[in-house]
Image: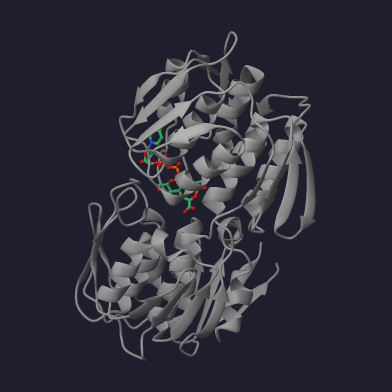
Amino acid sequence: MDKLVIKKSPALSGDVVISGAKNAALPLLMTSLLTDDSCLFRNVPALRDINTTTSLLSELGATVEKHDANSLTICAATLSSVTASYDLVRTMRASILVLGPLLAKQGKANVSLPGGCAIGARPVNLHLEGLTQMGADITVEEGYIRASVNGRLKGAHIFMDMVSVGATENLMMAAALAEGQTVIENAAREPEIVDLADCLNKMGANVTGAGTNTLVIQGVEQLTGVDHKVLPDRIETGTFLVAAAASGGKVRCLNAAPDTLEAVLNKLRQAGADIETGADWITLDMRGKKPKAVKLKTAPHPGFPTDMQAQFVTLNCLAEGTGVITETIFENRFMHVPELQRMGAKIELEGNNAVSPGNSQLKGAPVMATDLRASASLVIAGLVAEGETHVNRIYHLDRGYEAIEEKLSKLGAIIHREKE
Ligand SMILES: CC(=O)N[C@H]1[C@@H](OP(=O)(O)OP(=O)(O)OC[C@H]2O[C@@H](n3ccc(=O)[nH]c3=O)[C@H](O)[C@@H]2O)O[C@H](CO)[C@@H](O)[C@@H]1O
Ligand SMILES: C=C(OP(=O)(O)O)C(=O)O
């Protein structure tokens, strides 16, 4: 298993080009299941999760043609299967996003239950309840969700008990081809939902309200192919900005989308960073200063994203003053804390709060990455810790960060990958 070896590095400095968003690209690639036409996707990040998605689509019988590292065409005109197997779903929970499209277009789908993961139980009840309301017949047996519908799915008025990004996406895709109107109340408002709605509308769907908590989808009989560019990754952007802030450096993120990151930029300003933004770039300048501790609570968009929580835990450890971070989305998303403590971080876990008195003097250590963003928090810690840090199990990082060690090296970080 590969690991990252990181040495205490100078303040990060320079430009970094942001990749397309993993969490936008995954549902976008699934939209290809809704049409017989070819779909071209550009600015697709080169990630393990994208490879898993193309393997899944190929297993269903779609053809996938890669043009270069970041663009590909998918054609799902003739599918040979409607089954997403456990082997693929267990490596990527977002595989559940084939459920809505397969059901809407093929009338049936068998998808392995994703099961829990390091950050929480992550049930899929909202996906299943919404599709059932749209007329699907769903049973769960032998670890598989078996769904079918007689004829077309029917539009429905769906009120989501909780805000769920994935369930909103699954239901939107299903509703695009359903008969009649679907209204999704208490829908997720994430930028990735807006990108998905834009793509579906280019394919001939009729989705309105994306970015608000009420989505209205007028079903159509068929959808066409599309040429779609994936929106920039706001979590990758935020991760580089926190790394720059932790190191006291100055970094400019290019190909970014500043308007998707307001909550994160606000907290970075509170931490003492000077931030400037343009249409597609963000500059963070820490002017060699130590960050100030922040207080924050994760929440659905436009609140502070849970996917940036771990990185800010590292920032608070290094900062001046007491910081408090409250996780409200996932019940077990502090797995990075014990690993950071092994590096000398002063953090107390009190329920769903990570409280840090600040001014931790981090020392390099071998640490274990437990999930994607936990891994990112350990990499940031490694950049500022005295000595050498070995981040093991970086297959998690490879799920969600394109060429992270190359991008960090260009900013002056002393980091390399060791193959084992
Ligand atoms: C591929 C992708 O886009 N992943 C993101 C997506 O995950 P994902 O779509 O899985 O996350 P959700 O928004 O669905 O989860 C939010 C909360 O709702 C709960 N829930 C969800 C569905 C359901 O049927 N029942 C239920 O109880 C979850 O356990 C969690 O506590 O949004 C999360 C929250 O912003 C991010 O951390 C993930 O990076
Ligand atoms: C939790 C994440 O992803 P996933 O939903 O794919 O596990 C993430 O991107 O931080």
Could you tell me which residue is drawn at 37 percent across and 52 percent down? 333
Q: Which color scheme did the rendering employ for the protein?
A: one colour
Q: Nearer the viewer, residue 371 or 14?
A: 14
Q: As drawn, is 171 to the left or to the right of 297?
A: right
Residue 341 on image: x %, y %: 35, 70
In the displayed structure, would residue 410 be above or below residue 192? Answer: below
Could you tell me which residue is drawn at 30 percent across and 30 percent down? 161
Tell which residue pokes out farthest to the top in this image: 150
Q: As drawn, is 193 to the left or to the right of 35?
A: left
Q: Nearer the viewer, residue 46 or 104?
A: 104
Q: As drawn, is 237 to the left or to the right of 36?
A: left
Q: How many marks?
A: 0
- Image quadrant where residue 186 sits: top left
In the displayed structure, would residue 216 be above or below residue 121? Answer: above
Residue 34 on image: x %, y %: 64, 30
- For the C terminus, which image quadrant? bottom right
Q: Nearer the viewer, residue 329 or 299?
A: 299
Could you tell me which residue is drawn at 19 percent across and 78 percent down? 321
- For the N terminus, which image quadrant? bottom right
Asked whether the viewer can see residue 389, the reply is yes
In the displayed structure, would residue 29 be above or below residue 256? Answer: above
Asked whether the viewer can see residue 112, the reply is no
Residue 396 on image: x %, y %: 56, 57
- Image quadrant where residue 361 sits: bottom left
In the displayed structure, would residue 264 be above or below residue 399? Answer: below
Residue 286 on image: x %, y %: 36, 85
